[in-house]
Image (cartoon, rainbow, N blue to C red):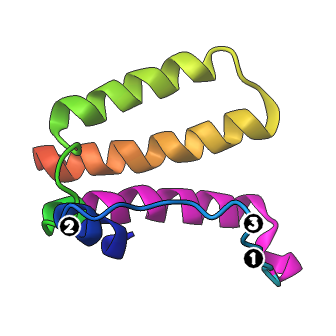
Amino acid sequence: TALCFMALNYDMKIGIEPSAKVFHNVSASRFTKEHIKKTTYEGIVTTYRLFVDGYSPKGWTYPYIVERINIINAELARLSGLAAYYKRCELEGFLAVKKMISGEK
């Protein structure tokens, strides 16, 4: 992700190769709710840190975080099951970033 942000900062283009194939040999132990929670949370916090460290050119401001939290809460009102679980995990990540930005404990 940091490499992509660096490329964009140098006005480089990023594309997708539709014919590319990637095979992931994923351990069955990763197919758990705890793994979903951990990777979702860490992905959000890491992306915020990339912004703070200057890799991401824009976006992770306090108003953006509040907007994401509001959107997720609205989505949660109509979701159930695994989709709702994922959104709750996402919400935890954005709430953690909100605390980081505002200095809340």
Q: Position of residue 29 (x, y in %)?
A: 82, 78
Please state which of residues 46 and 15 is positioned toward the viewer in this rendering.
15
Which residue is at the front of the view, 9 or 66? 9
Of tags 1 and 2, the one toward the viewer is: 1
- Which residues make up the magenta segment? 26-49
Marks 3 and 1, how far apart in space? 10 Å
34 relative to 26 in the view: left or right: left
Q: Quadrant of the N terminus?
A: bottom left
Residue at the spot of label 1:
22
**Image height of 71 relative to 105, above or below:** above
Q: Is residue 41 magenta?
A: yes
The crowding category of the residue bearing disc 3, from other C-alpha atoms within 10 Å (few below 14, some 14 to 19, many at least 20), is few
Kindly report which numbered mark, 3 or 2, lies closer to the viewer in this rendering: 3
The kind of residue tagged 1 is Val
| Numbered marks: total | 3
The residue tagged 3 is 19
Task: Give the SS element for disc 2.
Answer: loop
Q: Which residue is mark 2?
A: 55
Seen from the viewer's position, the closer of residues 59 and 98 is 59
Helix, strand or loop at mark 3: loop
Residue located at (41% from left, 55% from top): 44
Q: Amino acid at mark 3?
A: Ser
Q: Earlier in the sequence, mark 1 or mark 2?
A: 1
